Amino acid sequence: MPKIENHQIDPLNPVEDIAHRDDVIMRDNPVSRMIDRAVKFIGEIFGWLWLVLLVVIIGNVVLRYVFSQGMIELEELQWYLYAAAWLVGLSYTFVEDGHVRVDVVYENLRFKTRMWLELLGLLVLFLPFVCFVIYYSLPFVELSWVTGETSTSANGLGARWLIKGCLLFSFVLLLLAGLSRLLRVIGTLRFGPTSEAGEA
């Protein structure tokens, strides 16, 4: 069975085990802890939208196939809920380091090399992309708000700016999560990992 930096891989769940091994030995600081707690709290609140979405879907199916009464409002509410829960879930997943990483090269590198790659990825790819989306979503949401955009369907939902605003809100959260991760990476590179497992 392969070993990674004095850490035995769990044969039952190797992907999850590999995905989280750097995160648990990276250095925290008060700012990153505060950001992570806030993002997790918001993510947990929005996580309840999945349950609401399930109820709405079941209700819509029952209305349509049992009572032959389809409702466009419920259909649109489904993708409102799905979009909001999924978008806000991005930052929660990033903070939890639960995103999928499948990289044969990365997993065989030394811990310090991985941290330098993480730093480079955050500064060159992740944060610029997030800032780009925030910059261009601002007028997108503003236009929807100013024009009072509503659904194009006769019985559709109004306040289309609300769901478009979730895009902006979610990427602001993602920016905060990225800055938190950046602080942790810098702290780890400067002071070393929190355990000997990352010294190799």
Image (cartoon, rainbow, N blue to C red):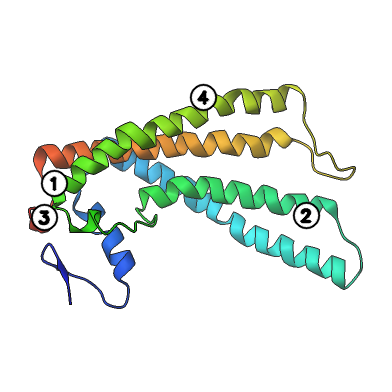
> Where in the figure is residue 50, as x and y percent of width and height?
60, 59
* Whether residue 5 is situated above or below residue 113 in the rendered picture: below
Identity, as a three-letter code, of the amino acid under mark 1:
Lys
Give how far across and how far down residue 122 sits, in percent: 31, 37
Q: Specify few, some or many for label 1: CA neighbours under 10 Å numbering under 14, 14-19, or 20 or more.
A: some
Labelled disc at residue 75: 2
CA–CA distance in space, label 2 to label 1: 49 Å
Q: The disc labelled 3 sits on which kind of residue?
A: Ser
Of helix, strand and loop, which one carries label 2? helix
Query: Could you tell me if residue 88 is visible in this image?
Result: yes
On residue 195, which mark appears? Answer: 3
Residue picked out by circle 1: 112
Under circle 3, the secondary element is loop
Where is the N terminus found, in terms of image quarters?
Answer: bottom left
Disc 4 designates what residue?
Answer: 135
- Foreground mark, 3 or 4, reads 4
The numbered disc on residue 158 is none
**Which residue is drawn at the image coordinates 62% and 62% (left, top)?**
51
Dot 4: element: helix
Which percent across, then down, holds residue 145?
70, 26
**Quadrant of the rendering where the C terminus is positioned:** bottom left
